[in-house]
Image (spheres, grey):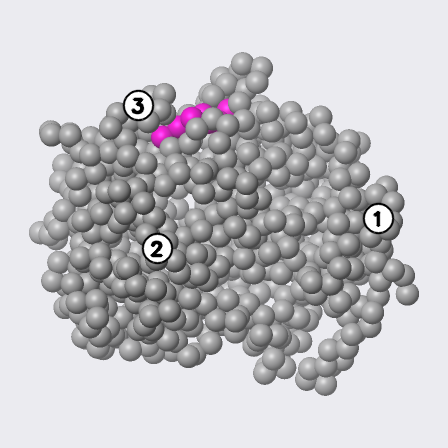
Amino acid sequence: MSTASSSSSSSSPPSAKQVPFERTYHGDTVTDPYAWLADSKDPEVLGYLEAENAYMSAQTAGLAGLRAEVFGEIKARTQETDLSVPVRKGGWWEYSRTVEGQQYSIFCRRRVLDGEVRPPLPEDGKPLEGEEVLLDSNELAAGAGFFRLGALSVSPGESLLAYSTDFSGDERYTLRIKDLATGQTLPDEIPDTFYGCAWSLDASVLFYVTVDEAWRPYRVWRHRVGTPASSDVIVYEEADERFWLSIHLSRDDKWVSIFVGSKLTSEWWLLDSAAPEGTFTVVAPRRQGIEYDVEVAANRLLIVHNDGGAENFELATAPLPGTGDSRTWTPLIPYQADTRLLGVDAFASHAVVYFRRGGLTGLRVLAADGESREIQFPEPVYTVSPGSNPEYTQTTYRLGYNSMITPGTVYDYDMVTGSLTLLKQQPVLPSPAGVPFASDEYEQHQEWAVAPDGTRVPISLVCRKGTPRDGSAPCLLYGYGSYEHSIDPTFSISRLSLLDRGFVFAIAHVRGGGELGRPWYIHGKMLEKKNTFTDFVACAAHLVATGWTSASRLVARGGSAGGLLMGAAANLAPGAFAGIVAQVPFVDALDTILDPSLPLTVTEWEEWGDPLHDPEVYFYMKSYTPYENVAAAPYPAIFAITSLHDTRVLYHEPAKWIARLRAVASGGPFLLKTEMEAGHGGRSGRYDAWQEEALVLAWSIATATAAAG
């Protein structure tokens, strides 16, 4: 038995000690030699993680120059002092801004001037004249190694601000209230809250959510402003461990809503915000497999749902506060097999439907007289999404648009005339060498790979014009493929550092995501999860076969559930990649999903299956879980990144995975970087995040180049 390598030289890889730990389920006994790494309070575990960090630093020391170069490019191309497009709410323009040299955003507002219709936008990104600072995150984060906001909500009437903060990354926030008239923070302080909150109409009451021991948001509380948190009242508690909660306030400020959802089923409850001590009413009781989302529209509800076999969802109406039975809802947009309805925003005179069709997102405007039109865009590949639209009476609709070659663009769409007004496009400044960005120097493409079962899998890719198609170009292939979450083709400033070095950047839109609608998701989960992995390997093979790159120049990247994808792809086809970046990777999936005491496990059973009670699921998951399927074979270089305080994918998963790779496999090197002051999202400050991204990109560049050589 070797010892944990906290005493190892940073020039040699740590070798974790092996302590046999047996796990037996469904008659199957597995010995896990690295289970001891799960104890984050054990000094030996912390010493091992520090030793891994030291080894990672030594192994990447030669990248210092390239990393600094890439960081300099990201920084130079980013307009550091900038201001978001202001959004009107009541008599105020609300916006955020950043200041050169400061890590975090400053949240502000300015009164709407007489006759002012369009949002004010200074070109220099400086404060607006008459600005009032709602919250300066830099002041709150002063001296902290980590900082994140969980809630930021101005009350109806714009007199109070509720906000919550996390200083460790464990996603447990302390909720506070600020008096915007005096600028003083009130004595109210509520610890251990979850994301979000909702005000009553008169701002006397604040509703918030707390989590259970498994980090599941399960209780909604009512807090009366000016009273101690100890006197707060539970207004809803969810006992079913498959379900979680969130709290919302309708666009017209008249209804507080509680969303209750599992992976397959949802339920909504409504309360008149003018009567905060009243009783919540259910819109429609939950029925297994029926999902619905609710939007308040004057005296009725707009409901996007999948009842009646509407796999890709349809839009219906119901009277407020609901009929109590989804089968009595009135169809407004019937189910269409080729269009996945994602959501709806309701306004006094119009509604806007957010949808997905043919792999692209879209927006459809519905007028009160029944007329409808889709907003058109010129590029063949793009992403459009709803922006911030807080005013119920507004007649313009804020939206965001970008593509792999078009920077993030903000438009206002006039819902009456159909005109589209450009408000701002993300500035992309010249490189450190003074070379300006020009989108026409790049090109984007869509390719289709063929999976082993014959399914065609879309790939979005971008490169500089003139990039050779002879296999000589390096490539970074990104994938995710879970939770119906789509990785859409979008723009990235940091990606330019790859493209300008001759890289192709590609996204594999594998099953398990939502790019091609709900069926695309269904056929990449539960007992069809392996489709996600074989789709990704097929995409890698397609890029090689069509000359975009070669296996010796191909680096794969994914995070969280996409990290599971990285580990599974490494086991399936280790020779297909030169390197793999796995960020907060879910690589010990079976062991985690077997333990209902761990954060989020029970809520995940409807995504992966329940291996604790179902032998078929157990053995299926065992056959693909990356950690348990590491083989005595040559593997590509692997760089795993995790965070000590991550509550979604616990740090020990990648720690165990790297230890087993190093003990069983050949090839590599296998590197582990653990952020000791961060959570699932990594470093919180923007400069810190750029530094981490620069390291990942430098490693990817060097790995593709070295392997090809």
Looking at the rendered structure, the number of numbered marks drawn on it comes to 3
Under mark 2, the amino acid is: Pro
For marks 3 and 2, give the CA distance.
Answer: 36 Å
User: In the image, residue 593 lies at what x, y percent?
Assistant: 60, 71
For label 3, the SS is loop
Q: Earlier in the sequence, mark 3 or mark 1?
A: 1
Residue 381 visible here: no
In this view, the residue farthest toward the bottom is: 27
Query: What label sits on residue 122 in the rendered view?
Result: 3
Depth-wise, is mark 3 or mark 2 nearer the camera?
A: 2
Q: Residue at x 26, y 25 (%)?
A: 129
Q: Amino acid at mark 1?
A: Pro
What amino acid is labelled 3 in the image? Answer: Pro
Q: Earlier in the sequence, mark 1 or mark 2?
A: 1
Question: Quick check: marks 3 and 2 in contact, CB under 8 Å?
Answer: no
Q: Which residues are magenta?
A: 77-83
The numbered mark at residue 187 is 2
Residue 514 located within the stretch drawn in magenta: no
Circle 2 crowding by C-alpha within 10 Å: few under 14, some 14–19, many from 20: few
Indicate the position of residue 358 as horizontal and vertical percent values: 39, 49
Chain-order first, disc 3 or disc 2: 3
For mark 1, what is the residue?
13
- Give the structural element (helix, strand or loop) at label 2: strand
- In the picture, the quarter occupied by the C terminus is top right
Closest to the observer: 543 or 369?
369
Helix, strand or loop at mark 1: loop
Q: Position of residue 354 (x, y in %)?
A: 30, 51
The residue drawn where x is 56% and y is 60% is 647
Whole-angstrom CA distance, mark 1 to mark 2, is 51 Å
Left or right: 229, with 445 as reference point: left
